[in-house]
Image: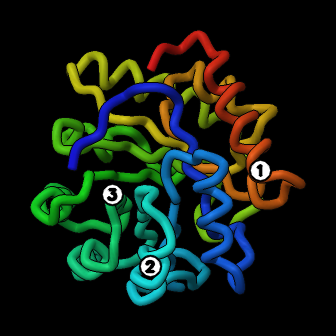
Amino acid sequence: MSLTQTTPMIAPSILSADFSHLGLALQSLEDAKADWIHIDVMDGHFVPNLTFGPPVIKALRAKTTLPFDVHLMIEKPELWIEAYREAGADGITVHAEACVHLHRTLGQIKESGAWVGVSLNPHTPLSAIEEVLSEVDLILIMSVNPGFGGQSFIPNTLDKIKRLTELCKARHVQPIIQVDGGVKVSNIKSIAQAGAHAFVAGSAVFKSNDVNQAVAELRKQASMSNHSV
């Protein structure tokens, strides 16, 4: 599965949803015309939290037709790619920091038929993925330290996104640049202007009074940037 850069894509993270009503949360996102469902998978080792395993994702798959954007924040993700793909992942993103053989792991994702994503933690330099830029459909820049929702956006992430945008241009590649962490109405425009195409938003959507309005406003603000996607 491949991706193309079109209009700004809003990918609400169900990490911020009410876990006792996840099916209803997915329906609300479908009604709000979200683009993807972002699913943060955590193992309690790579990050200090535990979330969703393949059985949960398989159960949720039947509740919506929206693409599942599965973000593996786990150790040894190469052992789990097939399981998450079979559970219903449309896209699978792994962390460069978690992969001893990153190129091989990205190849596994591609072979599974999912779109291929790679993620970087805030402290990790872009050089960690420079040699695999041509292998990925999506690059996820973490703008908070991963593990918990509701954190504040790290300001110097904007410069990192700009540098990634220039690096991709120089290498003649066009992956989707996605940003995750502290994304909200007040900063999404500047994130888009830096070069991002896709936006993960948890608290900004699920802690709002109106999910439909939150998704619409995020999309509106991202669309107002001078950055052309």
Q: Residue furthest top?
A: 226
Mark 1 and mark 3 residues within 8 Å of each other at the beta carbon: no
Amino acid identity at mark 2: Ile
Q: Residue furthest right?
A: 209
Amino acid identity at mark 3: Gly
Q: State whether residue 151 appears in this view.
A: no
Q: Residues within 10 Å of mark 2 (few under 14, many from 20)?
A: many
Picture coordinates of residue 214, whole percent (x, y):
77, 44
Picture coordinates of residue 213, whole percent (x, y):
79, 42
Q: Is residue 221 left or right of residue 1?
A: right
The CA span between labels 1 and 3 is 22 Å
Towards the viewer: 102 or 86: 86
**Considering the numbered disc 3 on the image, is that residue within a helix, a strand or a loop?**
strand
Q: Specify the quadrant that holds the C terminus.
A: top left
The CA span between labels 2 and 3 is 13 Å
The CA span between labels 2 and 1 is 22 Å
Residue 41 against residue 126 in the figure, above or below: below
**Considering the numbered disc 2 on the image, is that residue within a helix, a strand or a loop?**
helix
Q: Residues within 10 Å of mark 1 (few under 14, many from 20)?
A: many
Which numbered tag is attached to residue 126?
none
The residue sitting at 48% across, 41% down in the picture is 178
